[in-house]
Each structure stands twice: as structure tokens, then as C-alpha cells.
Image: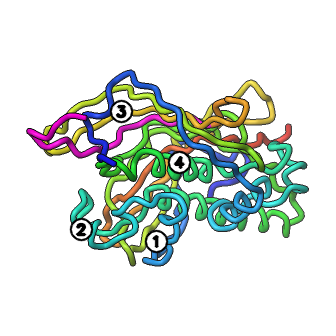
Amino acid sequence: MIGLWYEDHEVGQTAPLGAHRFTREAILDFARKFDPQPFHLDEAAATKSIFGGLCASGWHTVSVSMRMLVDGRHAQRKALATQGEKPPPLGLGRGVRDLRWSAPVRPGDEIAFSLRIDSMRETRRPDWGLIGMRIMGVNQHGREVCAYTLLGLAARRPA
Amino acid sequence: MDLLYFEDFPVGEVVEFGDRVVMAEEIVEFAREFDPQPFHLDEAAARESMAGGLIASGWHSAALMMRINCDEVFLRSSAQGSPGIESIDWLKPVRPGDRLSVRRTTLGARTSRSRPDIGVVEMRFELMNQNREVVMQQQGPVFFGRRANGEPQP
């Protein structure tokens, strides 16, 4: 497990984020709200598309990966609190680099997400550091479906 | 309406479109499902955080921009998805009541070597608020079908 303060991170560290099953209903629901292109909504149209069948919006896949990341951190914050330790203030995301949707996510697919710490640097603000974490999703056949580097602020441990 | 094809996105073109007001309820609804952090969920908790008040998840902003792009461009085009995004920058917070629009710039265009019926258009999308501040910027390729040979140009 990787700690929550900036200083707890180290380039190269990895951690699993758990797996999520993409149901047909959830794929259609997200697509109706945010990405109503035929290959995310309609099986017949999707078969004729570049994807060869219905698949989740790439924005759905990355949004789920965020949920996995947030849930993991939330559990860690609760654990710290029960030990009587104050968890660090939450930092905001700054951006994303090199986002790849490497393979389609199909209804019923179970995607295992993981992260790797890729970069760390201090910022102009002495209480925040910037962490680059590579987040990856792999399907039940071992094939990568998405990967991206999330740049996010992490609070620095008070001296 | 005629479909937009690869050939309809000339390099250098800048187009603005979309008009979407974001409500507090939808910010919270998205956050409950995908990004349940206090600054996306609860105004009082958000005020205590570095966000200084309720803000949309950056992934919600990305999803909203996708919806605007679908409604204004992709759904009346031969768009065939995207292999990825080079960069997303969340430059300013999106807050309840913000009115969003998109500025699209065509940066480059090339045909696919492996799929001669597909063209790759490199696009920059800027999500703007009602004060014309860019709140999010995104850059990456989009696949479009090519107009079949012999089909008349618009």
C-alpha cells in the first residue's frame, strides 16, 4: 500500500486498485448521458463500426478507474483516522498525459485496475507536491484496455 | 443533413459551439458514481478544501465536453472513436451554474496507412465557461471515415 502524503510516494511503486465488471446496462447508461455514439448504444450499428461490436465509452472506463482510486484512498484515510492520525488534505487533479484506449471494453468485461508512481516533483507551493501516476486497466484476458498518467497534487507531510 | 467526413476538417479551422449549463445536482450525481471526494459532493465540505467550494470532477468536465462534441459534431459525422488523448489540462474549476461551450481547432490531418477508408484528425478542444475562460484543454486524434471516391464534395 502506498501512503497518502507526498513523502510516502516513491517512483516505481505499484499498487492494485481492484476489479470492476462493466455491465451492459451501465455501458448504455453512461453512453446515453455523455457519449451517445452508435457504437456505445446500439449493438447492430456497433457491429458495423471500427469496434466490431458494442463497447463502453472510453470516458466511462477512465471514470470507473477514478472511482477505484478514490475508494482505495478513502479506505486508507479511514484507517488512519481510526488510528487517531489526521489524514492529509485532499489534493486536486491537474491533468492527464498519454491516455490510451488500447482495446474496447465489452459488456460483461471485468477490468482490473492498478497504478504505478511515475514521477514526483515539488511545486512552488511548499505544502503540495505533484505526483504522476500511471493508471492501467487490464481485461479478463490479460489485455490492456486503457492507460493514462494522472497528474495530481499530494499534500506534503508537515515538518 | 450530410455526414461530415475526414475531408470536412481542414487544418487550421477553429470552430465554437455548444451551450450547456451545469447544475449542482448533476455535479453531485456524477461524483457519487465516479469521483466521491468531498469537493465534488458537498458544498460545506468543499468550502473547507483547496477547491474553496463545490466543483465538478475533472472527469465530469471531460464527459460533458464529450456530450457537447457528440451533439454538435460527432453524431452527424463518420466519427469512429479515438485511440487516446495526448493531454488533458484542468485549468480552472467548473462550478454549479457555469455555462459551457467548446472551441475546436484542427491541428493536423492524415490518412491511415493500415485503414485506407479512415483518416486521423488531430484536434484541440477547449472547454470554456460563460466568461470565456478556458477551464479544460484537451488534445488528441479522432478517427473519421473518408468520403468514398467519386462522391461529390459539399
Residue toward you, A68 or B153: B153
Q: In the structure shown, which secondary structural element does the residue marked by tag 1 occupy? A: helix
Q: Amino acid at mark 2?
A: Thr
Q: In the structure shown, which secondary structural element does the residue marked by tag 3 occupy? A: strand
Checking the image for residue A28, the label placed there is 1
Quadrant of the image containing the N terminus of chain A: bottom right
In the displayed structure, does residue B43 sit left or right of residue B21? Answer: right
Marks 4 and 2 on same chain: no
Q: Chain of mark 4?
A: B
Checking the image for residue B68, the label placed there is 4
Residue toward you, B3 or A143: B3
Whether residue A54 is situated above or below residue A85 in the rendered picture? below
- Disc 3 and disc 1: Cα gap in Å? 27 Å
Q: Dots 3 and 2: beta carbons under 8 Å?
A: no
Q: Which residue is mark 3?
A: B122
Marks 3 and 1 on same chain: no
Checking the image for residue B28, the label placed there is none
